[in-house]
Image (spheres, grey):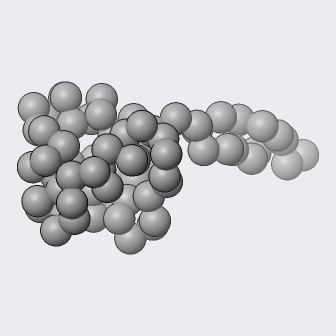
Amino acid sequence: MAYLVGRCLLQKLLDQKDMEQIELAHRLNVKPPQINKYVKGKQRMSIQVAYNIAHILNCHIEDLYEWIEVGDDE
């Protein structure tokens, strides 16, 4: 099975955790516009950033994006 990365679900997760983008930016030690780029789909997170965000939000890296099934490995 193969997958493509779909839209970013970060804003949905932030809403569920009642956390603002600015708070996440502060906890990651980045500027708030960087978080907004992820939320708006203008930039994808590196694996390091995704891991740290998942840790902060207490979720799995896979939860940060939609995953689109595109193939079968059979």
Nearest to the observer: residue 18 or residue 43 = 43
Please state if 7 lies on the left or on the right of 61 as rendered.
right
**Above or below, 37 relative to 14:** below
Residue occupying image coordinates x 22% and y 65%: 30
Please state if 63 lies on the left or on the right of 58 as rendered.
right
The image quadrant of residue 1 is top right
Count of number-bearing discs: 0
Residue 54 placed where, x, y %? 29, 54
Residue positioned most to the right? 74
Please state if 26 lies on the left or on the right of 70 as rendered.
left
One can see residue 58 in this view? no
**Above or below, 64 relative to 44:** above
Residue 37 placed where, x, y %? 39, 47
Residue 20 placed where, x, y %? 13, 39
Residue occupying image coordinates x 10% and y 32%: 18
Residue 16 placed where, x, y %? 19, 29
The image quadrant of residue 19 is top left
Nearest to the observer: residue 61 or residue 41 = 41
Please state if 12 lies on the left or on the right of 30 as rendered.
right
Residue occupying image coordinates x 78% and y 37%: 70
Residue occupying image coordinates x 45% and y 66%: 47
One can see residue 42 in this view? yes
**Above or below, 59 relative to 67:** below
